[in-house]
């Protein structure tokens, strides 16, 4: 079997060990509720089976066609369309089996009051089906998808199923957090920063003292290190986060809570390419895949500071920073421009049109060609001062 | 008539000297060299025309000619044939071919004619379905033997229990187209060769090469046994092994009737010859008596159109009148010739022949109604064997017969082969690329029965491509093809059903256990219920719906069809699915090498011949 990343499973298991010292995962009412939902799913299957009929699970569809943009709330919402997953359908039989197997896994987890990483759950449910050479799962991806299905089918959250993802994302800044009882001063995190956990629910993380006035979210670790080294968060009194590309749920949940609970505006510094644009879109409106979680993750007021296509001329960058758009980039850019939540925004239409006209993309690091600290000392401060961002 | 004029441009030349003064042979000089060529001489030089192109083929052809004659003789005498073929290897490239039958024997006076003269026979001048047609075969084999080894042909014949066997050694004189008798003796001690009290044995010593496989003596006998299930054939090969093709049926094939030629089937030259030879005195009676399907009114109509009358004397019919009559025949509507002169092998015998010869799982056969080409009645029969131990990834095999004689050479020139190519086998579940044979474990047998089979050459290797013949062949192929198609669909459906059920069954165990652990409902109960649903669902999914969406109970009329035989035991296990159950035993290694016809437990046996023979 393909072991995707040994380091990932290693860190996940050690994490779960330390957490199990105190009771971990969902507690009290949430736990009871989730167990009840799993139970009724199982009962429905048992009832249908005993009636000698074709058992099924209804799974809400996580596709663009079943996602709509709520203009009033300015976020993505999942529609009502569901997919009926039947046992007696050759194309669905295996997935049906996996759905039940993982539901059982989550029930075990909740009963044991322990948490597992997605990878841990994959291993927990992985075995060879009796009498065959077929495994219950071919790889972790197969199990991750089914777990997302279970989440939406039970209208619950992964966190409530006592599951967490691989840790990704870092934070530093003028704030103190209490993580599972430990007080963490994010002003004293050295060069590494505070690793944002996968589960950032209030039950795990509470906020302490906070002087910061806003949150600057950057796309990736390398850029974040530049800002941290230059003590940007200190000079500009802010919180500095990064999400290793597309931010995982933990990071998004934390950003939401900083914005929602502490009222800190969110400003993003991302690459000037369709993928950077979509990261912004996900932070702001929510994602298509997890549209059901938008309301507890989306930050409709988030701003896009840069990099922008016009910066090539405005900052007098050299030709060397250009990265030609490939066919996939072009296609994706056009797709994004047509998303309803971008369609009505003049600035964004202009921005994407200019990028397509330019025919190249740029990374945040391209500013380093001006000067090592150009981005922290000139670019971002100037834009912040001028409120030069797009919404 | 048994001669061919030499010098193709034998027009008489009268000039004594060329006018342009060139030097060269004069007509007189040339005339000295111009003489008759005997047919035997002609064929001695053109032996490839008779199937003696190379040593291997020569050996097969010799066996074939002798066996064909034996079968014909037995059938005509209404005797169940018991034929023994023996190949004795004298040296590397020299064989003695001996074929013995239990036929009626040959009277002494005819022996040298039959075995010593080319184009001498009983079958050429009549229209009757038989294996031999021209009277060339066996004498040509004898001639080939004499030419390659110098040895005469040995014939032993016994015509009745009361008469002793006669042994004749014949040496053919090719220039005279007749045979010299080297020796002639009565041999009462040879009576043991003919337990039935009659029969013929011919031995020819010849150059040859014995090799099994395609187009071999073995293949010829194999296929002969399929088309002649009423015959018992014993074959002793050069390795001294005895192979026996047992009789599949004790029923005599009905005797073929002789018919008169049909007027539309003859050519002008033949008509002129018939006019010259007839004993009738008037045209009307000539037409009515010497042709089939000519009634008095038809005769009258022909005569009127030809500008003669019924009563015109034959003597007065010259070339011009013949031509007019010939033309009139083409214009007048004449009933098709009778077809009861044809003896099909019959669906039942075809199936029993295929069953004993081919290790397949599915068999079907059909006999088409008779039709007519060029005034000659004929009928087509098709047999088909599919699956079992036949090789899967090769092109299908076509075995061809004319009047029960297997045709082994020149497949692609044969009308039957073309008919197979033109049949859309994809409709019947086989893959077929453009202008080629389909692929798959299939043997198709095509038989043409006719009073006169139109061969493309004297060696009788391929059936000439007449539209009427090819059309009938295609209709027959379609008929058996449809049955194959039904079988293939049924097989596929069963496989799908099996696959589907196994997918569900694989997961039901997991589902039952998960359900038990979530809800506490006993896994066994859930499991049993779901298994019942699985069975029902797969049956529903695979049910065939008719045009109005109603379920068709059984699409499959194969069970009631007596032209179909299915050997359940030979149906190979379905191929294993990737990652599937390991407990399925691997399908038994199908024989794919060499002969298509499996050799173990086939209804023929091999044994070493006893030493004191």
Image (cartoon, coloured by chain):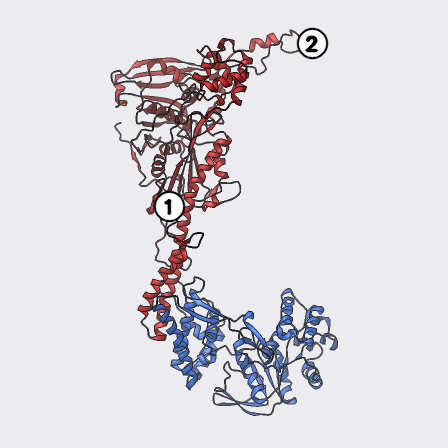
Chain colours: A blue, B red
The foreground one among B555 and B214 is: B555
Labelled disc at residue B295: none
Q: Quadrant of residue A150?
A: bottom left
Is residue B491 depicted above or below A171 in this figure? above
- Horizontal arrangement in the rendering, residue B301 relative to residue B401 (left or right): right
Q: Could you tell me if the residues under marks 1 and 2 are in contact, i.e. CB atoms within 8 Å?
A: no
The foreground one among B10 and B309 is: B309
Is residue B439 depicted above or below B190 in this figure? below
The foreground one among A375 and A310 is: A310
Labelled disc at residue B557: 1
- Residue plotted at (48% across, 36% down): B419
Query: Marks 1 and 2, Cα distance to the nearest angstrom?
Result: 83 Å
Front disc: 1 or 2: 1
Residue B223 lies, in percent from the top left, at 38, 33
- Residue plotted at (45% across, 14% down): B285
Q: Secondary structure at mark 1?
A: helix
* Crowd rating for badge 1 (residues with CA inside 10 Å; few <14, some 14–19, many 20+): few
Q: Secondary structure at mark 2?
A: loop
Q: Quadrant of residue A85?
A: bottom left
Is residue B423 depicted above or below B401 in this figure? below
The foreground one among B560 and B176 is: B560
- Horizontal arrangement in the rendering, residue B501 relative to residue A170 (left or right): left
Residue B572 lies, in percent from the top left, at 37, 49
Residue B1 visible to the viewer: no
Is residue A182 depicted above or below A226 in this figure? below
Q: Are marks 1 and 2 on the same chain?
A: yes
Residue A372 lies, in percent from the top left, at 68, 80
Q: Reading the chain from its start, which is encountered first: label 1 or label 2?
A: 2
Q: Which residue is mark 2?
A: B19
The quarter of the picture where the C terminus of chain B appears is top left
* Crowd rating for badge 2 (residues with CA inside 10 Å; few <14, some 14–19, many 20+): few
Label 2 lies in what chain?
B
């Amino acid at each position: 079997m393909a072991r995707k990343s040994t380091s990932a499973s290693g860190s996940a298991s050690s994490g779960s060990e330390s957490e199990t010292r105190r009771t971990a995962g969902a507690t009290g009412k949430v736990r009871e509720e989730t167990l009840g939902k799993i139970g009724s799913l199982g009962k429905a299957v048992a009832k249908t089976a005993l009636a000698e009929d074709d058992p099924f699970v209804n799974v809400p569809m996580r596709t663009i066609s079943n996602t709509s943009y709520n203009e009033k709330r300015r976020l993505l919402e999942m529609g009502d369309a569901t997919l009926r997953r039947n046992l007696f359908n050759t194309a669905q039989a295996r997935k049906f089996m996996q759905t039940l197997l993982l539901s059982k896994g989550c029930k075990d987890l909740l009963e044991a009051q322990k948490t597992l990483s997605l990878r841990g759950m994959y291993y927990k449910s992985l075995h060879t089906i009796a009498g065959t050479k077929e495994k219950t799962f071919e790889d972790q991806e197969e199990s991750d998808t089914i777990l997302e299905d279970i989440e939406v089918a039970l209208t619950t959250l992964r966190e409530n199923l006592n599951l967490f993802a691989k840790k990704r994302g870092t934070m530093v800044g003028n704030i103190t957090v209490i993580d599972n009882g430990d007080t963490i001063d994010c002003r004293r995190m050295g060069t590494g920063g505070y690793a944002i956990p996968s589960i950032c629910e209030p039950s795990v993380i509470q906020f302490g003292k906070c002087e910061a006035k806003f949150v600057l979210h950057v796309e990736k670790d390398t850029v974040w290190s530049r800002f941290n080294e230059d003590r940007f968060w200190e000079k500009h009194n802010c919180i500095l986060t990064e999400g290793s590309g597309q931010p995982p749920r933990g990071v998004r949940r934390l950003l939401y809570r900083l914005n929602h609970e502490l009222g800190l505006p969110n400003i993003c510094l991302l690459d000037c390419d369709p993928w950077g644009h979509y990261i912004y879109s996900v932070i702001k409106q929510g994602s298509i895949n997890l549209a059901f979680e938008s309301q507890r993750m989306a930050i409709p007021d988030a701003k896009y500071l840069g990099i922008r296509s016009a910066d090539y001329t405005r900052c007098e960058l050299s030709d060397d920073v250009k990265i030609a758009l490939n066919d996939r980039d072009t296609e994706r850019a056009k797709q994004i421009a047509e998303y309803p939540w971008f369609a009505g925004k003049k600035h964004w239409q202009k921005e994407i049109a200019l990028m397509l006209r330019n025919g190249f993309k740029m990374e945040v690091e391209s500013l380093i060609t001006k000067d090592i600290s150009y981005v922290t000392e000139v670019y971002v401060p100037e834009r912040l001062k001028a409120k030069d961002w797009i919404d | 008539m048994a001669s061919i004029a030499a010098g193709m441009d034998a027009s008489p030349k009268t000039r004594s000297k060329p006018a342009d003064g060139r030097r060269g042979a004069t007509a007189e000089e040339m005339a000295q060299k111009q003489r008759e060529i005997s047919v035997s001489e002609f064929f001695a030089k053109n032996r490839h025309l008779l199937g003696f192109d190379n040593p291997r083929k020569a050996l097969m052809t010799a066996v074939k000619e002798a066996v064909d004659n034996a079968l014909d003789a037995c059938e005509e005498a209404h005797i169940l044939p018991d034929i023994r073929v023996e190949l004795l290897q004298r040296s590397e490239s020299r064989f003695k071919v001996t074929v013995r039958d239990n036929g009626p024997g040959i009277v002494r006076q005819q022996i040298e004619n039959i075995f010593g003269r080319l184009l001498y026979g009983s079958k050429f001048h009549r229209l009757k379905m038989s294996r031999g047609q021209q009277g060339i075969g066996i004498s040509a084999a004898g001639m080939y033997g004499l030419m390659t080894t110098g040895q005469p042909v040995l014939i032993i014949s016994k015509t009745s229990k009361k008469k002793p066997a006669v042994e004749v050694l014949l040496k053919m004189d090719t220039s005279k187209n007749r045979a010299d008798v080297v020796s002639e003796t009565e041999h009462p001690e040879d009576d043991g060769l003919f337990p039935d009290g009659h029969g013929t044995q011919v031995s020819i010593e010849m150059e040859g090469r014995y090799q099994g496989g395609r187009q071999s003596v073995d293949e010829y006998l194999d296929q002969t046994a399929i088309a002649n299930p009423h015959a018992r054939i014993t074959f002793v090969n050069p390795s001294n092994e005895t192979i026996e093709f047992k009789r599949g049926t004790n029923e005599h094939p009905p005797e073929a009737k002789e018919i008169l030629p049909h007027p539309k089937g003859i050519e002008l030259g033949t008509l002129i010859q018939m006019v010259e030879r007839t004993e009738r005195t008037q045209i009307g009676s000539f037409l009515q008596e010497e042709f089939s399907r000519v009634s008095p009114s038809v005769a009258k109509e022909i005569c009127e159109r030809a500008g003669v009358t019924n009563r015109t004397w034959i003597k007065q019919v010259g070339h011009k009148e013949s031509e007019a009559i010939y033309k009139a025949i083409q214009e007048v509507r004449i009933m098709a010739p009778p077809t009861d002169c044809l003896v099909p092998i019959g669906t039942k015998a075809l199936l029993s022949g295929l069953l004993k010869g081919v290790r397949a799982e599915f068999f079907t056969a059909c006999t088409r109604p008779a039709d007519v080409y060029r005034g000659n009645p004929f009928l087509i029969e098709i047999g088909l064997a599919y699956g079992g131990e036949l090789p899967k990834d090769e092109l299908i095999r076509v075995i061809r017969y004319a009047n029960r004689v297997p045709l082994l050479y020149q497949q692609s020139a044969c009308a039957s082969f073309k008919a197979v190519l033109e049949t859309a086998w994809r409709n019947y579940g086989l893959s077929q690329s453009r202008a080629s044979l389909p692929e798959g474990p299939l043997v198709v047998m095509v038989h043409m029965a006719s009073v006169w089979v139109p061969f493309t050459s004297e060696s009788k290797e391929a059936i000439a491509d007449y539209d009427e013949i090819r059309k009938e062949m295609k209709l027959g192929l379609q008929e058996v093809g449809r049955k194959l198609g039904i079988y293939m669909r049924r097989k596929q459906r069963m496989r799908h059903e099996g696959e589907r059920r196994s997918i569900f069954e694989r997961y039901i165990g997991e589902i039952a256990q998960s359900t038990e652990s979530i809800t506490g409902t006993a896994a066994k109960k859930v499991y049993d219920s779901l298994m019942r649903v699985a069975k029902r669902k797969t049956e529903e999914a695979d049910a065939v719906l008719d045009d109005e969406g109603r379920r068709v109970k059984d699409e499959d009329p194969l069970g009631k069809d007596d032209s179909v035989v299915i050997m359940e035991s030979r149906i190979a296990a379905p191929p294993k699915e990737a990652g599937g159950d390991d407990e399925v035993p691997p399908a038994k290694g199908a024989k794919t090498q060499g002969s298509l016809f499996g050799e173990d437990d086939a209804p023929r046996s091999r044994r070493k011949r006893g030493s004191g023979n």
